[in-house]
Image (cartoon, rainbow, N blue to C red):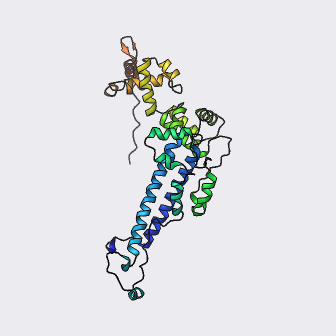
Amino acid sequence: AEPGLRFSDEQVRRLQIQLHVHTQLLAQVMLLAREALGSEPRFLKVAMLPYAMLTELCAYCDISLAYLQLRARPTYATLLAPALPDEAHRDAPTPAESPHSVFSVPGMHLLPPLLLGDSLGLKRVYDAGSARAREEMVKNGLRAADGGDFRLAEEMRRLEPHLNRAYLPVRESSSSRSTLCPAEDRLFAVGLLRYGLGRYDLIRERLLPSKTAEALEQRFHSATRRSTLDNPIKRAQAQCLGGALSVAEDQVLRDAVGALGEDWERIQKEKLPHRTAHQLSTAWQYRLRPGARREPLPLPPRAPVIGGQSLSSAATAAAANATASMPPPPPLPPQPPP
């Protein structure tokens, strides 16, 4: 390669730091998701995605190290080079120092035995032929080769000396007795804004699979009480109630109108209880109904007619008559000469 295309030592060092943090976060997510697979099969995708990425990183690491070793070995070790006499070995140049590699990060040598080992158990799932086969393996329970369970503490203890403590998983402390930590409260608020109020099943499936729908509902009621201090869930509720319907609520309203017709009281009661019937009717008539976007907004009603004239016309005529009946203003006093 040309000298101008090489990375400097400082650039390699920065790449090593980034790769170290990247591999550490992937390994932590994989191990935590593997631990959760014992009680919640929905974490299968969460565990397999970092597993696949770490496997690819290890493959690139092997290729990179093999290439560096090939370039670093001396000329006489190359099979295509002419053989040298034994005396020439003493004067042969020493191998050049291997160039730096971005894969030379702490703990990288522990990843292959972790990924391929039987204690993790994800290698068999990764090699399964289909997604259905993977789901069946998880439902039947992933066991180690010795029949034991996965030990998260043991695996983390093995990796801990090589990890950056600033990026270790830490559960945020909460002053309340909620089963959700502050980070999960913020994620719950995102789900309320995205999928609408009352969709605890969808929020659990998409964002918080480790929680039950009942736990999310209890947390919503406790966080939105009038005596509760300001929190993300309370702000999300106010935004949902005071603003327009979300995209998810629009789709629920379309499906409800298709199934129940324009029975707004029933739709409000069965599908969107946190909205009023007037909100649903207005959203359908002026925004969601086919062709509604091409219609202008309704004008305010005309003023009632009194004696053949509207209120505005009568008020204008009365003001004109009152002005005509008023006496003219007195003349201005003469100004003194300068």
Answer yes or no: is residue 208 visible. Answer: no
Q: Is residue 194 above or below residue 305?
A: below
Q: Position of residue 297 (x, y in %)?
A: 36, 26
Total residue callouts: 0
Q: Is residue 118 left or right of residue 3?
A: right
State which quadrant residue 296 falls in.
top left
* Residue at the limit of the structure toward the top, as seen here: 307
Quadrant assignment for the N terminus: bottom left
Q: Position of residue 178 (x, y in %)?
A: 65, 40
Q: Is residue 51 above or below residue 317?
A: below
Q: Nearer the viewer, residue 44 or 204?
A: 44
Residue ID at (40%, 75%):
72
Residue ID at (60%, 59%):
158
Q: Position of residue 179 (x, y in %)?
A: 64, 40
Q: Nearer the viewer, residue 155 or 244?
A: 155
Q: Is residue 248 above or below residue 335?
A: above
Q: Nearer the viewer, residue 299 or 153?
A: 153
State which quadrant residue 304 falls in.
top left
Answer yes or no: is residue 145 visible. Answer: yes
Residue ID at (52%, 40%):
137
Q: Is residue 333 above or below residue 51?
A: above
Q: Position of residue 211 (x, y in %)?
A: 59, 38
Q: Is residue 93 left or right of residue 117?
A: left
State which quadrant residue 90 falls in.
bottom left
